[in-house]
Image (tube, rainbow, N blue to C red):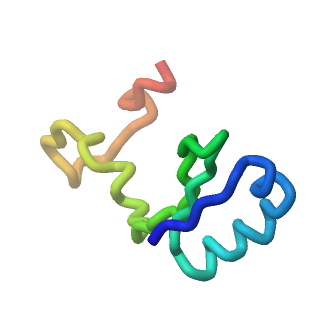
Amino acid sequence: MVARVSKSQFKAKALELFREIEATGEPLIVTDHGQPKLEIRRIAQKPHNPLDRLKGSVLRYDDPFAPVGEGDWEVLK
């Protein structure tokens, strides 16, 4: 079962509750006048692959072994 805490209790014990969420992985519902308003949970970490940022950035590359000169760079024009 998901734990629930009121806003006032959350404010008083926020750091303690954060540590508990980090340790257990269980989410926490913050309520306001008995009504659920927020859910606090640990972020699921995805493995980071630096090459993912480059996917789709090269549209076409005709001759990969041809030398590149200073005049070939758009940024220098």
Of residue 75 and residue 34, the one placed in the foreground of this image is 34
Q: Residue at x 54, y 45 (%)?
A: 36
The extreme bottom residue here reads 23
Q: From the viewer's perspective, is residue 55 above or below residue 41?
A: above
Relative placement, left or right, of 13 versus 2 is right
Q: Give the quadrant of the N terminus.
A: bottom left
x%, y% of residue 53?
A: 38, 50
Q: Residue at x 41, y 71 (%)?
A: 47
Of residue 27 and residue 33, the one placed in the foreground of this image is 33
x%, y% of residue 8?
A: 80, 49
Q: From the viewer's perspective, is residue 38 above or below residue 22?
A: above
Q: Residue at x 54, y 52 (%)?
A: 39
Q: Quadrant of residue 18?
A: bottom right
The extreme right residue here reads 12
Of residue 67 and residue 74, the one placed in the foreground of this image is 74
Q: From the viewer's perspective, is residue 44 above or below residue 35?
A: below
x%, y% of residue 72?
A: 36, 30
Relative placement, left or right, of 15 versus 65 is right
